[in-house]
C-alpha cells in the first residue's frame, strides 16, 4: 500500500523567503549568526505550543518523540513498517507520518486521518521533537523515543542543519560548538528533552531506548517496539521490518527520508538524512576537551532540573585533557 506522493527534495514555499535571507546573510559573513537565529526559532516555545493545540491523542496514534538527530527517521521507519506489518511503501515518509511541529509545510497534516484508514493495523505515526510538556498525553496512545549521546547529537546536527541551510562552508565546527553549549541552546534543550521522557519511562505505553542499544541490537530493540505498539507479526513480517529498518536499506532509499535541500546549495552534495547511523563517533569532529565540556554541561543541567537520568551509565563520559595534549580532529565536513 502506498502513501501520498511526496518528493525527496520537498521545500515549503513559505520557507523560500527565509532561505533567500539566509543566502544573503551568509555571503555577507553572518553564517554563525544565522545558525544561532535558526536554532532559536526551532526551539520557540510558542511554536511548540501551537503544534498540538486542541489535539487529543487516540489509540491510533504512535508518537515518535525523539530529540533532533537522535534516530528520528530510524524510529519512524521501524514503527511505520510495524504498523504495515513490514509492507509500508511511500515516496516520502512524511506522506504518512504527521509532523505538527515542522518548521515548514510538507508533512501530512495532523488533521488528515487517511493514514489511519490506510494502515492495516489502524495505527499512524506522528513525529515530534518536542519535550513532554508540549506533547499531548493519552494512555491509549503509544510514545516511542530514543536517547542519544549529546556529543553525537552535536556532531550530527552540525552536518544536518549546516547542510540544510547551505552553511557548512560558512560555519566551522568550533562555531557550532560555541552556539550549541551557550546558555539556553542546543545542549540544554537536549537535557530538558531527555529528562522529560526519562520521567515517563515507567508508563506502560512509553518506550525509551538508547541509541547505542538500537544500533548494537536492532532485532531486540525492534521487538520491544513491536510489543509496545501491540502489533502481532509473523516471523516473516518481523524479518521484513528488520530488513527495512537497516542502515543499508534506508541508505539505499535516502530519498524517502531526505530533508529539504538548501535553496542555493551544491546539488552534487545533498544533505543526507541517513548519513552514518554510527554510535560513539563524536570524536570525528570534537576535541577531547569539547567532548568533556558537553558531558559536564549536560550532566549539570540534568542535576539542575532534578532528573535522575543515569547519564554516565547510558553514555561514555569523556574526561578533559590538558590543552597541550588535546587532539584536534579535522573541522571540515
Image (tube, rainbow, N blue to C red):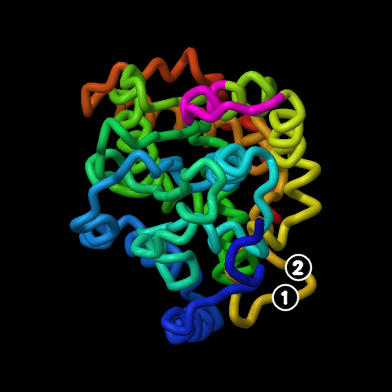
Residue nearest the observer in this picture, 288 or 186:
186
Which numbered marker is on residue 266? 1
Residue 232 counted in the magenta span: yes
Residue at position x 48%, y 13% from top? 313
Residue nearest the observer in this picture, 282 or 52:
52
Residue 215 counted in the magenta span: no
Residue at position x 47%, y 84% from top? 13
For label 2, count other residues whose C-alpha is less than 10 Å away and answer few (under 14), some (14-19) or many (20+): few
Q: Which residue is mark 2?
A: 269
- Furthest residue toward left: 54
Tell me where residue 277 appears, x and y as whole percent.
68, 39
Does 201 sit above or below residue 197? above
Check if mark 2's residue and mark 1's residue have beta carbons within 8 Å. Answer: yes
Disc 2 on helix, strand or loop? loop
Does 196 sit above or below residue 109? above
Residue nearest the observer in this picture, 194 or 5:
5
Q: Which residues are magenta?
A: 224-234
For label 1, count other residues whose C-alpha is less than 10 Å away and answer few (under 14), some (14-19) or many (20+): few
- How many numbered marks are there? 2
Amino acid at each position: 500500500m502506498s502513501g501520498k506522493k511526496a518528493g525527496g527534495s520537498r521545500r515549503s514555499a513559505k520557507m523560500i523567503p527565509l532561505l533567500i535571507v539566509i543566502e544573503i546573510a551568509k555571503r555577507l559573513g553572518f553564517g554563525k549568526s544565522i545558525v544561532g537565529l535558526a536554532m532559536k526559532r526551532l526551539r520557540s516555545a510558542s511554536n511548540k505550543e501551537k503544534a498540538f493545540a486542541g489535539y487529543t491523542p487516540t489509540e491510533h496514534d504512535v508518537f515518535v518523540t525523539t530529540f533532533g538527530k537522535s534516530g528520528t527517521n530510524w524510529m519512524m521507519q521501524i514503527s511505520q513498517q510495524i504498523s504495515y506489518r513490514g509492507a509500508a511503501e511511500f515516496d516520502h515518509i512524511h506522506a504518512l507520518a504527521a509532523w505538527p511541529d515542522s518548521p515548514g509545510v510538507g508533512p501530512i497534516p495532523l488533521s488528515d486521518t487517511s493514514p489511519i484508514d490506510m494502515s492495516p493495523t489502524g495505527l499512524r505515526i506522528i513525529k515530534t521533537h518536542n519535550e513532554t510538556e508540549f506533547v499531548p498525553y493519552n494512555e491509549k496512545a503509544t510514545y516511542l523515543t530514543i536517547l542519544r549521546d549529546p556529543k553525537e547529537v552535536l556532531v550530527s546536527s552540525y552536518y544536518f542543519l549546516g547542510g540544510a541551510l547551505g552553511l557548512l562552508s560558512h560555519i566551522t565546527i568550533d562555531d557550532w560548538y560555541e552556539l550549541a553549549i551557550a546558555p539556553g541552546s542546543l545542549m540544554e534543550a537536549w537535557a530538558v528533552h531527555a529528562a522529560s521522557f526519562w520521567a515517563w519511562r515507567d508508563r506502560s505505553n512509553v518506550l525509551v531506548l538508547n541509541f547505542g542499544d538500537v544500533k548494537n541490537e536492532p532485532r531486540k530493540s525492534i521487538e520491544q517496539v513491536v510489543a509496545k505498539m501491540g502489533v502481532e507479526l509473523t516471523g516473516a513480517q518481523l524479518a521484513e521490518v528488520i530488513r527495512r529498518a537497516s542502515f543499508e536499506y534506508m541508505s539505499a532509499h535516502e530519498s524517502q527520508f531526505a530533508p529539504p535541500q538548501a535553496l542555493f546549495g551544491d546539488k552534487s552534495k545533498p544533505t543526507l538524512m541517513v548519513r552514518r547511523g554510527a554510535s560513539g563517533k563524536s570524536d570525528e569532529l570534537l576535541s577531547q576537551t569539547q567532548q568533556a565540556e558537553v558531558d559536564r554541561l549536560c550532566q549539570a543541567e540534568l542535576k539542575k532540573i532534578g532528573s535522575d537520568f543515569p547519564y554516565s551509565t547510558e553514555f561514555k563520559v569523556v574526561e578533559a585533557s590538558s590543552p597541550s595534549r588535546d587532539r584536534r580532529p579535522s573541522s571540515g565536513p
